[in-house]
Amino acid sequence: MVKTLFLFFQRFNTPALDQMIIEDEVRTANLSRCRVITGLYLPLAVIIHFYFRYGNFISKPGAENWVEGYLILNLYIGSISLVLFLTAFWLKKTENEQGLLSAVLPHFVFLLFAIGGATCSVYDQTLNNSITSFLLACLLNAAILLIRPLHLFLYLSTIYLGFCYGLYLTQHDQTEMVLTIIDALCMVTVAYAIAWVFWKNNMTRFKQGRLIKSQRMVLVHQYEKLARSNAQLEVSNGKLEESNASKDQFFSILAHDLRGPLGSAMALTKFLGEGEFESDPEERQKMYMLLQNSLNNSAKLLENVLLWSTNQAGVLNFKPTLLNVYDTVQSSVEVLKIVASQKQIEVLNFVPKQLSVYADSDMLHTIFRNLLSNAIKFTPNLGNVEVRSELFASELNGKPMLKISVIDYGVGMSHKVLSNLFQIEKKMIGLGTNNESGTGLGLVLCKDFIEKHEGSILVESKENEGSKFMITLPGRN
């Protein structure tokens, strides 16, 4: 017997998913249905009141008390319905559908109309044996509201027992009382069966809805993940194509620009080896200078190629240390002193001697050497190249920043050249004032190195007025 009772009540045990559904979908559905039931009863209560108050009834003994009882009961049920309707509306308005009040509200509504229907049927026994009100209240509430079967069993059992007690007090015909009690039991059983079926169907529907929703979310998540992967692949593919194009252009530049200086050097050494200029020392000296320039250009090109390829491969060491800016600039000036003296160009270092910066020594030397070399190349003979500096506070975070400018007053650059200046696939660098050649690879290398220091490079230039290359690095005074 104990085991049978245990198995019976175990059927009412709610699993975790069912509990979640009761707390979410069931409460939301019940709250909406409570608004409908209570809202529809309010105008019905007014109609009932006017019907019984002003309608014509067949005169029967006790009819006045029967009508008065109906009016009082209707007033109570209507007033409570109004309160419940306003409560349900407020819960919806405040989006508080998962609170304790929204959980117990359907139980109040069910009990109100079930007890009201039973009471009306008890009142009917004074004139007739109708239990229509009890029938409608039980069936409609059971078919509309979602009450857990165990709770519904307790409610219907209690209301049925109360109805039977009311019949005992009002129905004096024993036969009619027994028949009415049996009819009421059938009604309660049917109402419970309907409610049980509706509960199971709704729980199944809610579970399927959750399953569909979860599957839809999984599909959406997978679609978004696939879209992100495709976008990343497109970006990677674009970068790969850009990298391949850059490398193809790079090798094209390398083959072209090495062929020129090396070809010239081979021709000059052949002429010098054959003694073509032995009788003319001035011409021979000129050939030596041309040979030196050709070899210098080749050496510079190879040095930049080596640094650029090492940087692209990601194996170039980045070791920032505290450097004196003036000494670093001056070291690069000394390296290019012979090149500048050939054009009688003076390189002026106006950087304060106490200025320092955290930077990689080799990279910073490469940056200055390339910028100064370009400035010398595009400055006419007897000109000047200036290096100036400026400390300022960053507009983003207020941290000190150092701006170093390499300024020349040479041929300058057009807007077209400026727009493609730091792109390796665009060979925009022309010949210098003494026909010095260049590839533009040095500027690409400068930009990469400056960005490794979390800095930036800007250029201002006008044709026939000169150029100003400005690099900005995190500063230290």
Image: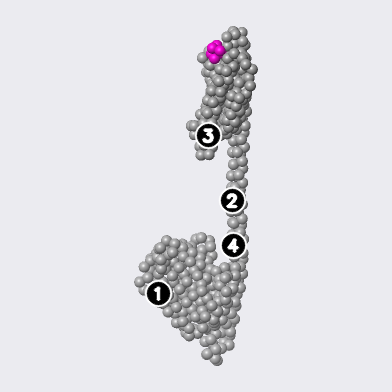
123 or 37, nearer to the observer: 123
Residue occupied by mark 1: 351
Residue sitting at x 42%, y 61%: 397
Disc 4 and disc 1: Cα gap in Å?
37 Å
Find residue 333 and report its image quarter.
Answer: bottom left
Q: Are marks 4 and 1 in contact (CB under 8 Å)?
A: no
Q: Which tag, 4 or 1, sits closer to the chain's start?
A: 4
Which residue is the site of mark 3?
86
Give the quarter of the figure containing the C terminus: bottom left
* Amino acid at dot 1: Val
Query: Relative to 58, is 228 above or below?
Result: below
Foreground tag (3 vs 4) = 3
Say what secondary structure mark 1 lies in. loop
Q: Are marks 1 and 2 in contact (CB under 8 Å)?
A: no
Q: Amino acid at mark 4?
A: Ser
Residue 156, quarter of the rendered image: top right
Q: Is residue 168 magenta?
A: yes
Q: Which residue is mark 2?
A: 228
**Real-space CA distance between mark 1 and mark 2, rounded to the nearest whole angstrom:** 49 Å
What range is drawn magenta here?
165-170
Q: Earlier in the sequence, mark 1 or mark 2?
A: 2
Amino acid type at mark 2? Arg
Query: Where is mark 4, residue-wise?
Result: 243
Q: Assess disc 4: are there few (<14), some (14-19) or many (≥20) residues with their C-alpha within 10 Å of its C-alpha.
A: some
| Residue 59 quadrant | top right
Query: In this orientation, does residue 241 appear?
Result: yes
First reached walking from the N terminus: tag 2 or tag 3: 3
